[in-house]
Image (spheres, grey):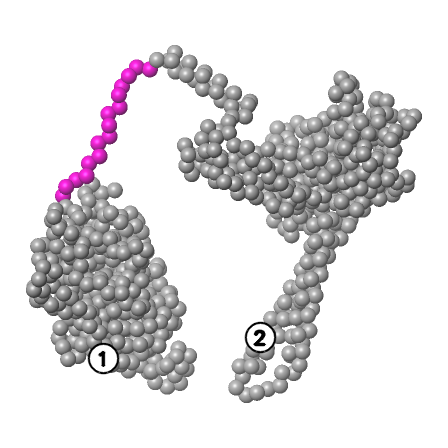
Amino acid sequence: MSLFKARDWWSAVLGEGEEFDQGCLCVGDVDNSGSGCDKVVVGSYMGMLRIFAPHASKPAEQTVADAQLLEVQLRDPIIQVEVGKFVSCSELLHLAVLHPRKLSVYAVSGTAGNVEHGDQYQLRLVYEHNLQRTACNMTYGPFGGVTGHHFICIQSMDGMLMFFEQESYAFGRFLPGFLLPGPLCYCARTDSFITVSSTRQVECYRYETLAVATDADTRQDSEQQSKSSGKRLAAEWLLVLGEQALDIYVPSASPMASSIFVLGERNLFCLRDSGQIRFMKKLEYNPSCFLPYASVSEGTTNVLLGNHNNMLLVYQDTTLKWAAQLSCVPVAVRVANFLELKGLVVTLSSEGHLQCSYMGTDPSFFTAPKVEAREVNYDEVDAEMKALHKVIREATKNQVSCRSALQSPKLSVCVQPPLAVTQDQFVLDSLGMYPSFSFTFSPSLSNLCFTTQATCSVPLLPGVPRVAQCKFVLPLRLVCCPTSASKNSKYKITVDTNKPPVNLNEVFPEFVAKAEDKEGNALAFQFIAGSRVTVLASKTSQRYRIQSESFEDIWLVAKELVQRFDRHFAKLGVKDFRNSFSGPIPLAEYFETVDHHFELRVNAQKYQDLLSERAVQFRAIQRRLLTRFKDKTPAPLQNLDTLMEGTYRQVIALADAAEENRACLVQAFSRLRSATHLLILLVSLWQGLSAEQTAILEATLLPLLQDTPQLGWEESVDAAVSHLLRTCLSRSPKDQAISLSTMQLSMPKDTSRLKKHITLLCDRIGKGGRLSLSSEANSMWLIDPSVYCLALCSCIP
């Protein structure tokens, strides 16, 4: 930040919602008053043209209204304004206004007023040119060495230079190798035009070369004619900048024989007329505009340079001479002479803040307030710290009520597949103190755990979001209903307990109303998906059988049965109750679900490969047809259109099949997750695993929430199980030599290796192996499933 501020001599804010750029500002005696005072001309992208005659502000004077000479609303946006001798039959100054599709030249005249309302100014159209191409910018000067008049050169968006000799159109030339338009400037000393192309190099074209080059109406015609006949347009010299240029300026009264200034994104360049670098200044900020002008020191040039830090810097060649703070970021800067003061700096911002200022010497000081020194009472600080800790502990234990209004609260419902909600986000109105609200949604299918997340902000901390999370378990009655029990089913498991059998109607009271067995020995559940699960209680033993035609659907009922048994006996005060599973682990049934999921993944890869092949074939046919259609000599299509139509049908059919397979894959992964949950439950009941060991097993067999083309369930689980077999379940120290980080995860050819490892995992757990890791680092990523997933993802090639 500069110590000095630019002294505001006169300023105005132009319009509301208007936009301005570097070409929207110019200064000059546009009304030809002969007083030697410049006028400020400003045009906007909204088509508003304004002319000002600024003067020093007085306390009892409306400066903006009194200084504004003219305000006209034009029909088209104004890209650039310039003041020059643009009329052939007059040597007076006129105003040239560039629109996207039109160039207009106006005469500004003033009539002295005889009453208190003051002088009146008028804008009269002298002539205009309708452009065939969209304009980007323009420059003017005595092209070809003409005296007493100025010609205009307009650069179009497609790279054509259009030359106008006052009221007539002279010629147009396309720049070679053009891609995007850049800044354009005319150098009268060499009668040449300087621009910066999209290849980030300065290019110089002589006017004589442009005039005698081959004429063309389109770029294609220009390229063809340059190859066949006529003079080809070539640059006089080139200079590689290595960065895009913001503006180019050639001072009219430079003290040196050659001075061409180019403002880049990070550097300021000064070139000679021959294209050689005179000097270069590396900038430590983002520049926005610049203006070179004559210096009082012989052999040097001053440069006014504005940047995006609201700074106006004055350089003498490469030396910084002054820095002043502005009130806004300038996009255009000019130097003007007024009646009261000469050499004022005129700046314009993109929002329309027009300011005439000079470099003042009144510093803006900031003195930091003195800190009151006092002795610290450590007893009071210790007591305050204890009180704050107590408040924090109470806040973490109990729910804290909000004592201020909540702003823009949002509620999000996060579920895991196959659970789904009809609406996952709720936007609520602002709530006052102690808010309460309710919402409804419709879940579907099995896993009944979900998380809600509330986001809001409070007035005390604006812009800082507050987030609260809460986990819920939905009732079983939401996804199934009671039905008649089935005697025989394909899949069966048996859960043992160490207490006498209980009435199932007491364990599942919400299903009693429609239960057929009033004794509570049998209970059946009909899922929404269509499958049926039956629970049978033995009359003579302490065993319960769960059976169904779908293996994965047993998990939800088995989990509910085990959890409800624990709660039931806990209410009765029984402390030694225990659920168990005597085995064997149904691995064959589980592997059927694994194979089905893997088969769909293989099909998805096949469909992807076939689609790629057909897409390549389709594009090749398109290229051949396009070549035939462009050929001037008609030729038979040779059934290419029929082949293209057949290929298109194949692409559509393959896309439909791939989409259908993707939907089946999502459903298969949900079934695989349910079957894996059942396997984890049975293993934990079989060996009596602790909560920590169960978490390790769940993180190993369920590392992903969903499949992706880059990482699938099979390779992730295989890597995790292999790591367990080499660490806590290893039989030999040699197995621990291979680390997980050295493995590359990719889709396997089949599931034989995975099934072998899962079988070996269950076998070692059944023989006394325990999932308790001795390494602290390993235990960190295995216990937390989310962190474990990150460790697996880092192994992707």
Q: Residue drawn at (77%, 24%), measured in percent from left and top?
A: 568
From the viewer's perspective, tell me whether residue 681 is left or right of residue 287: right
Q: Residue drawn at (67%, 78%), measured in percent from left and top?
A: 642
Q: Which residues are drawn in magenta?
A: 361-376
Residue 355 in percent (x, y) is at: 20, 53
Going by the numbered disc 2, the residue's amino acid type is Arg
- From this view, report whether residue 646 is shown above or below residue 537: below
Spatial CA span between label 1 and label 2? 48 Å
Residue underneath mark 1:
167
Q: Which callout, 1 or 2, points at the residue further toward the start of the chain?
A: 1
> Magenta stretch: residue 366 in it?
yes
Classify the position of the N terminus by image quarter.
top left
Q: Which mark is residue 623?
A: 2
| Secondary-structure class at tag 2 | helix
Front-most of 97 and 480? 480
Q: Residue drawn at (25%, 69%), measured in percent from left and top?
A: 97
Residue 572 in percent (x, y) is at: 77, 19
Quadrant of residue 25 within the rendered picture: bottom left
